[in-house]
Image: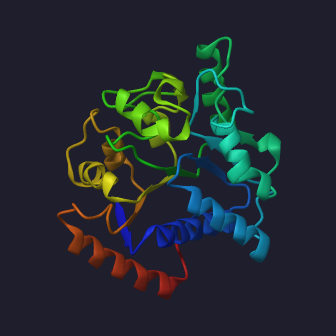
Amino acid sequence: MRVIVEADADRVATRAAALVAALVRSKPNCVLGLATGSTPLGTYRELIRMHREEGLDFSQVTSFNLDEYVGLAPTHPQSYRYFMQVHLFDHINIRPERTHVPDGRALDFDAACAQYEQRIREAGGIDLQLLGIGSDGHIAFNEPGSSLGSRTRLKTLARETIRDNARFFDSEEAVPKMAVTMGVGTILESRRCLLLATGSSKAEAIRATIEGPVTAQVTASALQFHREVIVILDEPAASLLQRREYYDDVEQSQRVYEQQTGRIW
């Protein structure tokens, strides 16, 4: 993993958006895997700014979101389809038919999940998967104990996840208890992964993900098996890393390489 530590959450967002934009510019018809939650909001705001002020063109981009709550309509204010529309899609020139979010109200979830996997394959696979991380180390809704080879499927949410997400709902009881989520195996098939984390509440999960053993109890740790992962953290999220000095040395060398070659990826 390439570990980048920035001073604060705003710098995390700017750095992440620059990486996404570089891919979009070099491969206009790229396939982006997108995430929801509070962490990527700054990145989406910066991408919107780049679209409006710098002409960043999303017209050929295809997107696939990681997950969706079961039972929520796309127009529900807490659905992830609604989140993506409000915070990104409505403000850039991505084509609606190229945006994909799992169906949380499918009549046949097995068929709908298989179809989602098929659509990803038909699109050529995901070029860059954007990820956040839960306080217990989960990615997407792959809760602790999830199979590291799992595919898109229904998943029961852990109580900790429900408590964490209750701030977006009227109450903890209002949070759906199940979600449709890409599996760990699906995520690992993306060509690149970009994991973002900010705040001290994510510090232990980040330490376990980067420096701990690979375990289904911390599903983000499976990213250690991926050949191209960039992790961007703010100082609080990086505060428990034991090899911080080495990561900083690697990043300094990487920046020299980028300056000499002009290549970000």
Q: Which residue sits at x=42%, y=81%?
A: 255
Q: Which residue sits at x=64%, y=68%?
A: 46
Quadrant where the N terminus lies? bottom left
Q: Quadrant of residue 139?
A: top left
Colour pattern = rainbow
Q: Is residue 154 above or below residue 84?
A: above
Q: Is residue 204 above or below residue 184?
A: below
Left or right placement of residue 56 versus residue 212 in this view: right
Is residue 191 or residue 155 the one in the foreground? 155
Is residue 137 or residue 185 the one in the foreground? 137
Q: Which residue sits at x=75%, y=76%?
A: 54
- The answer to whether one can see residue 173 in this image is yes
Spot occupied by residue 57 in the image (x, y as percentages of width and height): 78, 64
Spot occupied by residue 97 in the image (x, y as percentages of width and height): 81, 40
- The answer to whether one can see residue 265 in this image is no
Spot occupied by residue 49 in the image (x, y as percentages of width and height): 71, 70
Q: Is residue 30 above or below residue 12?
A: above
Q: Is residue 39 above or below residue 234?
A: above
Left or right placement of residue 111 versus residue 89 in this view: left
Give the farthest residue toward the top.
Answer: 108
Give the farthest residue toward the front.
Answer: 170
Spot occupied by residue 215 in the image (x, y as percentages of width and height): 25, 36
Left or right placement of residue 91 versus residue 175 in this view: right
Give the farthest residue toward the left.
Answer: 242
Is residue 107 or residue 223 the one in the foreground? 107
